Image (cartoon, grey):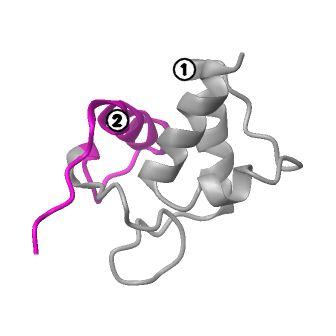
């Protein structure tokens, strides 16, 4: 099975996530764009709700996009790096 490669936007956001969370167990390049960010399933990055807050802050600072809990699109956006990147880029485009 071929590896899923990050596109440039995903790579940038992956770097932001690794930096914001000070991740020691994974590099930005190792984050599989389609893998779950949260939970403890195989392949998951294993993040938790505190990490989500840190990611939201980093996204707001870097992209100027607010991730609001009352927005029904926010929760699914945290499903994977790819979903989060697409969400951020879409929200950034409509600002």
Q: Is residue 44 above or below residue 20?
A: below
Which tag, 1 or 2, sits closer to the chain's start? 2
Which image quarter: residue 48?
bottom right
Q: Is residue 6 above or below residue 15?
A: below
Residue 62 tag number: 1
Q: Horizontally, is 75 left or right of 68 in the view? A: left
Q: Name the quadrant of the C terminus.
A: top right
Q: Name the residue under label 2.
A: 15
Task: Answer few, some or many: residues within 10 Å of disc 2's Cα (few below 14, many 20 plus, some between 14 and 19).
Answer: some
Query: Which residue is located at x 33 percent, y 75 percent?
Result: 43
Q: Horizontally, is 93 left or right of 4 in the view? A: right
Q: Where is residue 71 in the image (x, y as percent from the top left)?
A: 83, 47
10 falls in the magenta region: yes
Residue 73 tag number: none
Q: Position of residue 84 (x, y in %)?
A: 53, 46
Q: Where is residue 14 in the image (x, y as percent from the top left)?
A: 37, 41
Helix, strand or loop status at disc 1? helix
Give 3 or 14, whichever is nearer the viewer.
Answer: 3
Q: Give the range drawn in magenta.
A: 1-28
Can residue 58 be seen here? The reply is no
Q: Do the residues labelled 1 and 2 touch (CB within 8 Å)?
A: no
Q: Name the quadrant of the N terminus.
A: bottom left
26 falls in the magenta region: yes
Can residue 68 be seen here? The reply is yes
Query: Which residue is located at x 36 percent, y 31 percent?
Result: 9
């Amino acid at each position: 099975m071929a590896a899923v490669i990050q596109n440039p936007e995903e790579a940038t956001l992956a770097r932001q996530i690794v930096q914001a969370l000070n991740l020691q167990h994974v590099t930005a390049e190792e984050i599989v764009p389609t893998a779950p960010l949260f939970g403890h399933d195989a392949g998951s990055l294993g993040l938790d709700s505190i990490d989500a807050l840190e990611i939201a802050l980093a996204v707001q600072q870097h992209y100027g996009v607010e991730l609001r809990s009352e927005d029904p699109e926010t929760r699914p956006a945290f499903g994977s790096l790819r979903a989060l990147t697409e969400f951020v880029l879409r929200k950034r485009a409509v600002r």
